[in-house]
Amino acid sequence: MVIKDVSLEIVCGVSSRLPETTLPEVAFAGKSNVGKSSLINALMNRKSLARTSSQPGKTQTINYYNINHALYFVDLPGYGYAKVNEKVKAQWGKMVENYLHGSGQLRQVFHLIDIRHAPSENDRTMYDWIVKSGYHPVLIATKLDKLKRSQIQGQLKLIRTGLNADKNTVIVPFSAETKQGREEIYGILDGILND
Ligand code: GTP
Ligand code: MG
């Protein structure tokens, strides 16, 4: 897939209803600071259209990026950000759950996990949530550039077992720095568009 045309088209806050879209959607879910917005920028070939930040909790809305007038990338707000209060956490959960259940156009969920760490309780909850909503997520192991080559296979195994993901679950190691893994993700997107 070659991405030529992108724009941030819809920003959906806590109190807004989900938009009624007509294009297929792919969503990006994961812990705060795991690299969702960075992955979206890397796929779009933009440095900063999706706002990234070293401070977790940057994206607190559901952002829809129109890609080539053919599909939407949906950047979901990150979970597991310790500094927000319970009310905000509950709002987050409602928003994401509402999205997973309510979007009629969602075709694939990319679930991002930091390759350096074993999945957390929150990661497991999110994963189970996606599966229970009827999707078979593609796992993206982010920040690949932070590991030595010799560590990669072991960490991928840790992610798979930690989430109790079955052996058919695809895990793509990815780095927003080196763009490693990007072609494989484009391939998955092509598969969705040609469906
Ligand atoms: P929220 O919007 O808070 O949920 O975070 P996010 O998941 O969108 O994370 P974001 O893309 O903003 O990245 C968080 C931090 O991690 C930033 O400082 C990024 O530069 C850094 N980062 C993201 N991806 C990579 C990567 O592949 N390699 C390295 N080294 N750093 C990365
Ligand atoms: Mg973000």
Image (cartoon, rainbow, N blue to C red):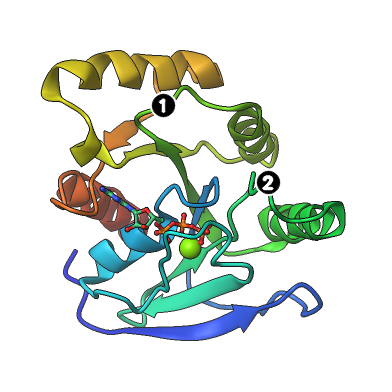
- Against 29, residue 155 (above or below) is above
Is the residue 101 above or below the residue 73 in the image? above
Nearer to us of marks 2 and 1 is: 2
Task: Label 1: state its secondary structure.
Answer: loop
Give me the residue at 49% from left, 38% from top. Answer: 137
Would you call the spot at circle 1 few (<14 residues within 10 Å), some (14-19), or many (20 or more)? few
Q: Nearer the viewer, residue 78 or 8?
A: 78
Residue 101: x %, y % from top left: 73, 54
What type is the residue that disc 2 sits on?
A: Ala
Q: In the image, 179: left or right of 190?
A: left
Task: Name the kind of residue labelled 1 in the image.
Answer: Thr
Which corner quadrant holds the C terminus? bottom left
Residue 80, by quadrant, is: top right
Position in image of residue 99 (x %, y %)? 69, 60
Of all residues, the one furthest to the right in this rendering is 87
The quadrant of the rendering that contains the N terminus is: bottom left
Q: Is residue 62 above or below residue 100?
A: below
Q: Earlier in the sequence, mark 2 or mark 1?
A: 2
Residue on which disc 1 sits: 169
**Front residue (pair 84, 69):** 84
Q: Residue at 41% across / 63% down in the picture?
A: 37
Decide which of 97, 86 is in the foreground and name it.
Answer: 86
Question: In the displayed structure, does residue 144 sit left or right of residue 21?
Answer: left
Mark 2 vs mark 1, CA separation in Å: 29 Å
Residue 175 as seen in the image, left or right of residue 25: left
Looking at the rendering, the quadrant in which ligand 1 lies is bottom left
Q: Position of residue 41 (x, y in %)?
A: 30, 68
Q: Is residue 193 above or below residue 18?
A: above
Residue at 59 percent of width and 81 percent of height: 11
Residue 15: x %, y % from top left: 81, 77
Tell me the residue that label 2 is attached to.
82
* Mark seen at residue 64: none
